[in-house]
Image (cartoon, helix red, strand yellow):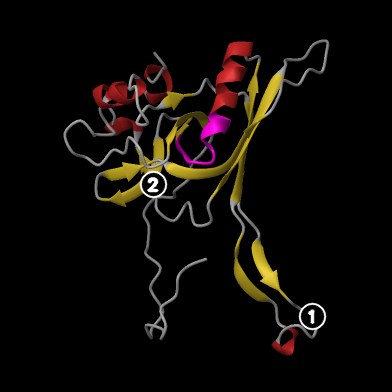
Amino acid sequence: MADCNCPLDGELESIPSADCPFNIKQIQKLAFVVFNNGNFDGTAGNDITLKADWDTRLTAGDLTKQVITPFVGGDITITAGEPITNGGGDNSTLGGITEVNGFNPSSFTARWDSLTPAQEAAFKKLNCYDKIGLGVIFINQDGDLFVEELAANSYRNMKIETYAFGDKNNQGFGTKDFNTMTFQLQEGWSENLARIDASSLDFDALTDLVNP
């Protein structure tokens, strides 16, 4: 929930105009890393638009290592968290008016098809880092990157919580086996979301970012 100054600033803050819409579109790959590690702050060796700086992270032997997923199979959704409320239509609040005390985290879900046992095991090992914090970068259908913007040309992965990767589902004849991933994004995660347009990259994020 947005932090509010007290006393209030006075006048309402203007909502900025925009020439273009902002949509994530379909997420097709993800990059995972331990949260707040391997950030791209725009300095030498840390430029998010350069393949060489990504390669350093993909081959790292420490917590800056980035891990790229295979293409998502489908069912990719991010569902915004519902408001956390108190009272409403009863005697627990003044005038019976519902109070909004915050928002629940947003929920991410996606499906991966026909994974090998080794791939499934690697996805599940990410569970072990959930307690110290995992971060994620989204790669969409156009090869755009979606990250948290800290300042001009300075970006980091978005923090996730409650990462879970389930066992293989099998539904028999004429179907593909699949596994489902879920995690949560903290309330307010999209307020500082930045799109790094594919045209600004010196590589194709969908095909050139692969694990060594």
| Residue 93 colored in magenta in the image | no
- Dividing the picture into quadrants, the one containing residue 34 is top left
Please report the residue visible at 72 percent of the width from the left and 16 percent of the height from the top. Answer: 177
- The answer to whether mark 2 and mark 1 are in CB contact below 8 A is no
Q: Quadrant of residue 191?
A: bottom left
Vertical relation: 41 (above or below) 30: below
Observer able to see residue 76: no
Q: Quadrant of residue 116?
A: top right
Identify the secondary structure beneath mark 1.
loop
Image coords of residue 10 (percent x, y): 38, 86
Give the residues in magenta.
126-137
For numbered disc 2, what is the local secondary structure? strand
Q: Which residue is mark 2?
A: 148
Please give left or right for residue 77 compared with residue 176 in the image.
left
Relative height, residue 98 to residue 206 (above, below) = below
User: Residue extending furthest bottom?
Assistant: 95
Classify 10 Å Cα crowding around label 1: few (below 14), some (14-19), many (20 and above).
few
